[in-house]
Image: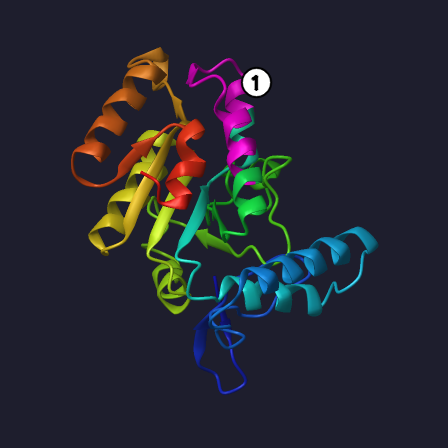
Amino acid sequence: MVSTSSEGARMPVVKCSSCCSRPCSPIYPPYKGMSSALQALIQFLINTAGEIGALRTPGRAILYHLFYSGEAMTTALLVIDMQNFVTDRINQGVDMFPHNAIDNMHTVLGTFRNSLNPIIHIRHHSTDVGSSLHPDSPLSQPVKGFEEKPGEPVFVKNTSSAFSSTPLLAYLNNHQITRCIVMGAVAGFCVTSTVRSGADAGLNMTVIEDAVISFALKEGMPEAKTILDVTLALLAADFATVIPTKRLSEHLSGKE
């Protein structure tokens, strides 16, 4: 997604949310040396602003950026392609695995938001009119519960890897993010492409094995579980750390 400045130069734009439509890489200078007391204060202000409906534009986003630009925030969650085409396939009875993946994703989102680690949403849009992933298609919209919140950037891609057609890597570098924890869909396609590209770029990549969705191929073969098992095994061999949801808190704290 690109925009044209008043000078006519093209610049990457990352849409943070409906209440923060300006470029966010970078907007505000990094907030260095943040104490735990200040972290708690900023989170209180963010939560309070959300409850009373205040600070919609741009104040609430400023609070997020002040926090998320801190040097200590080196780990981000990448939520890949959690769009309505996913639930549409499930509703059509396409074989998927693991069956509790979406519940686990909600758990992961809660863990990240509670720990104040940044969350980045990746969406896939097709330029082909009539495609289920064309921006005009309801199947391209985020799954309910996976909409971005203020301060959570959205990168729109048109390739399998989120790094190939968006300024994601530049954003991560600008925000001193060196580790990405990945969840979403689809495991054997955009998830694995993004993880491999991130690893090649020198990032520390982690995949949450029970919070990525695998679908069977046409006619049900190979099965979804088989595809997921092979995909995760290949990623673990040379590209990423693979962990279950229950180990996420320890992984974030660096205890493992």
Q: Position of residue 165 (x, y in %)?
A: 36, 56
Q: Which residue is mark 1?
A: 91
Q: Is residue 103 magenta?
A: yes
Q: Residue at x 27, y 53 (%)?
A: 203
Seen from this angle, which residue lies furthest bottom? Answer: 7
Q: Position of residue 26 (x, y in %)?
A: 48, 72
Q: How is the image coloured?
A: rainbow
Q: Secondary structure at mark 1?
A: helix
Query: Vertical placement of 29 versus 246: above or below?
Result: below
Side of 70 relative to 201 (left or right): right
Q: Position of residue 177 (x, y in %)?
A: 38, 59
Q: Residue at x 30, y 37 (%)?
A: 192
Query: Vertical placement of 17 versus 240: above or below?
Result: below
Side of 196 relative to 225 (left or right): left
Amino acid of disc 1: Asn
Seen from this angle, which residue lies furthest right? Answer: 52
Q: Residues within 10 Å of mark 1 (few under 14, many from 20)?
A: few
Q: Is residue 213 magenta?
A: no
Q: Splitting the image into 4 quarters, where does residue 252 fall? A: top left
Q: What segment carries the magenta color?
A: 88-109
Q: Splitting the image into 4 quarters, where does residue 174 fall? A: bottom left
Q: Splitting the image into 4 quarters, where does residue 147 fall? A: top right
Quadrant placement of the C terminus: top left
Side of 192 relative to 185 (left or right): left
Q: Residue at x 59, y 35 (%)?
A: 143
Q: Position of residue 250 (x, y in %)?
A: 40, 37
